Image: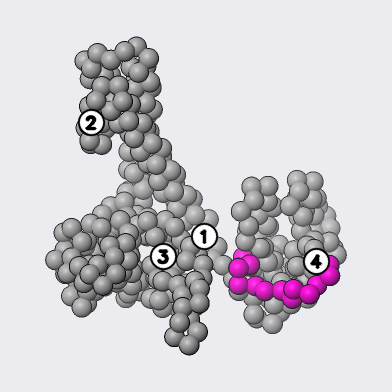
Amino acid sequence: MISRSARCLRRRPLETQRAQVQCIDEDFNGPDRVIVGDVVVEAFGKQRALRSIFTLNKALHQGYLARLLLANTAAIKQYDGLKHRGDESDARQLAHLLRLGLLPEGHIMPKAARAVRDLARKRMQLVQQRTAQILSIESSLSRHSGWKLSSNRIKCLRQADLDEMRLDEMPMLGLKANVAVMQALQTQIDGLEKVLADYCRTEPGYQLLRTVTGIGEVPATVILLETGGIERFADAGNYASYCRCVGSAHLSNGKKKGEGNTKNGNRYLAWAFVEAANFAVRHCEAARRFYQRKKAARNSIVAIKAVAHKLARACYHMLKTQTPFCVERCFA
């Protein structure tokens, strides 16, 4: 924990172990409470540190912290010649950058919006698990009976339909297990989609996104919840980069010398815009012509990504200016 005075709280680094977090909890709730101006937390993905983030979030809402900042560690470069490096030296480096106003920050979504966004991500996780069950059923039917059913027909299978197939006992038990799991997942997915639809339909941005060719209810929900406040993006290029819809190349003297981190961004937004691009190419003549031009010049993958880039830039301007979608301006 660091403040604008560039000093570590009580001269010790913020540990992520359970005992240290418990000590921080006691510091907040005890008589010798510590008031800190700003707290910077490094972006991480370790499960064991989530409790410390919960503690800091609670302290922020109770007024013990002025601000809680998320440091973008990918954009912070320390001197490589250090002989010793640890949590305390990292904390002092972050405090120094914060004091100079040079700290690269990440976005922390508000608590209420974060809960709904996580619910949308849970829905996508369940859909992936349902797809795994469908593929397993399709493979089992092909191996044991030679039948090939489409995914839509498999989704409509019931226990009575399986009994009519007259397969052997062991394959039948496996199919019934897959169908039961698939139906249970479908029930949960339908319930989550209803909750998400009720929440998003009251948002003005949702209605704007539904005017875009290729964006249905689910992609519109994902785009709205994952984007958050559109004002946090400086321009359309930044938003398209966050959606993983831009290329990456390191050039020198007109020659390509390498690539950057093409995966840097939001994978859920990348999925939503690629999904929308595929539907736009099918149902929009302007998008189809743009896709065919790009495909003739490069390949189909790059062409779909180019359509997704166009849609991402259009969605940025729509959410920024609160104007409906215009296909002529998008694919001009």
| Real-space Cα separation, disc 4 to disc 2, in angstroms | 59 Å
Look at the numbered disc 4 and give the secondary structure of its residue: loop
Q: Position of residue 112 (x, y in %)?
A: 49, 54
State the predominant SS element of the stretch in magenta. loop
Q: Which residue is mark 4?
A: 85
Residue 311 in view of the camera: no
Question: Is any atom of residue 252 visible in this view?
Answer: yes
Question: In the image, is 296 to the left or to the right of 93?
Answer: left
Q: Which residue is mark 3?
A: 243
Which range is magenta? 69-85
Count of numbered badges drawn on the protein = 4
| Three-letter residue code for mark 2 | Lys
Q: CA distance from mark 1 to mark 4?
A: 33 Å
> What residue sits right under mark 2 in the picture?
148
In the image, taking residue 14 as reference, residue 173 lies left or right, namely left
- Say which of marks 1 and 3 sits in front: 3
Is residue 73 on the magenta stretch?
A: yes
Amino acid on which disc 4 is placed: Arg
Label 2 CA crowd tier, 10 Å (few <14, some 14–19, many 20+): some
Mark 3 → mark 2, Cα distance in angstroms: 36 Å
Q: CA distance from mark 1 to mark 3?
A: 20 Å
Mark earlier in primary sequence (1, 3): 1
Query: Looking at the image, is mark 3 or mark 4 earlier in the sequence?
Result: 4
SS for dot 2: loop
Tags 3 and 4 in contact by the CB under 8 Å rule? Answer: no
The x, y position of residue 284, in whole percent, is 16, 63
Q: Is residue 124 above or below residue 319?
A: above
Residue 81 appears at what percent x and percent y? 78, 75
Disc 4 vs disc 2: which is toward the camera? Answer: 2
In which image quadrant can residue 271 be found? bottom left
